[in-house]
Structures are given as structure tokens and as C-alpha cells.
Amino acid sequence: MRFVQKPLFLLCFLFFTTISFGQEVTTYYLIRHAEKDLSDKSNPNPHLTEVGKVRAQAWKTIFKEVSFDKIYSTAYHRTLETAYPTAEDHQLNVEDYDPKNLYSPNFKKATQGKTVLVVGHSNTTPYLANKISEVQSYTDIEERIHGNLYIIQCIGDTVTTQLLSIE
């Protein structure tokens, strides 16, 4: 009888400790869209180049083991085409976000406690990283750079950021 009580006590202790001391973790993976077709300078919504399509597939491979809850993209061809391979691989829909209203209270609430991929642009991606971390660490991404990966983790009031270059 003592043998049964001990594991039961331990199980209850671990369960209640997790509830009372555990903190919710929100993790954001932020990337810029892959290489876009610049052949028509008047086109505000170009598709990805062949190199860009290869990079989008590479992101899928990189994110293979990440358990995403949500994937966001702006409504542009280049961002959606970058997000789709990863979304399909994780059996998730790509949700729209407004690049003019980054990290709104609604977005923050919808992503709280989740692991999220956000595909943005050379100016919106670092700006979103700054908004989430509440530190102005990042500037616009140079046009030739498509391999920045911002990883931001929020645990309670503590926010950590990492910037990796995957070129």
C-alpha cells in the first residue's frame, strides 16, 4: 500500500508544482521572405525566383522539428510562397497578419503560449522583433540578405532574443 501511495503523492506533487510554478512560454520564429523576382520593377507583388523557392524549401527543412502552433504571413506572393512549404509540412494554414499593425494586442493574445512562425519583410521582420522584445536592437535587413532567423522567447516578463544567419 505504501508503494502505491508514494508514486501517487509524487505524481500529485509534480502536477501541482507545474501548475503553480510553471510559466507559459511563447516562442516566435521570424524570417524575411525568400528571394523575390525583381525583373519587373513596377510589380509591387512579385513571386519568388527559383532561388527563392529553393530557400523556402530549405526553411521547411530547418523547421522540420519545430512544433509550430501557428504560421503567419503578410498577404504578398513572396511571403506566402515562403511560408507555404513549412505550413504544408506542419499541416497548418497560413494566417494573415497586418504589417502596419505589428504585435497588436489581438496578435499578442492569439500567439500567447504558442510557438509561431512569422514570415515578413526586410523592414517588418526586425521591427516585429523589436516590438516583441521591447528593445530597439534590430534594423532593416539589407536587400541581399534572406537568411536571418530571429528567435524570440517570452517566459513571463523575461524575453530572450537570438539572431541567426542561415545563408
Image: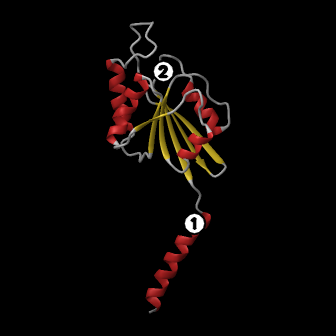
Find disc 2 in the rendering and name its residue.
Answer: 145
83 vs 154, left or right, is left
Q: Is residue 43 above or below residue 75?
A: above
Please tell me which residue lies in front, 120 or 54: 120
Residue 130 quadrant = top right
Q: What type is the residue that disc 1 sits on?
A: Ile
Find disc 1 in the rendering and name its residue.
Answer: 19
Residue 18 quadrant = bottom right
Q: Residue at x 48, y 81 (%)?
A: 8
Residue 69 in view of the camera: yes
Q: Residue at x 44, y 88 (%)?
A: 3
Q: Residue at x 63, y 34 (%)?
A: 131
- Tell me the element at label 1: helix
Numbered disc in front, either 2 or 1: 1
Furthest-bottom residue in this view:
1
Q: What type is the residue that disc 2 sits on?
A: Ile
Point out residue 55 in the picture as x, y percentages from the top left corner: 36, 26
Point out residue 65 in the picture as x, y percentages from the top left corner: 38, 46
Q: Residue at x 43, y 26 (%)?
A: 79
Q: Is residue 132 above or below residue 42?
A: below
Q: What separation in Å lies between label 2 and label 1 (alpha carbons)?
A: 42 Å
Q: Upstream in the sequence, badge 2 or badge 1?
A: 1
Point out residue 78 in the picture as x, y percentages from the top left corner: 41, 22
- Tell me the element at label 2: loop
Labelled pair 2, 1 in contact (Cβ < 8 Å): no
| Mark 2 crowd level (few <14, some 14–19, many ≥20, 10 Å Cα) | some
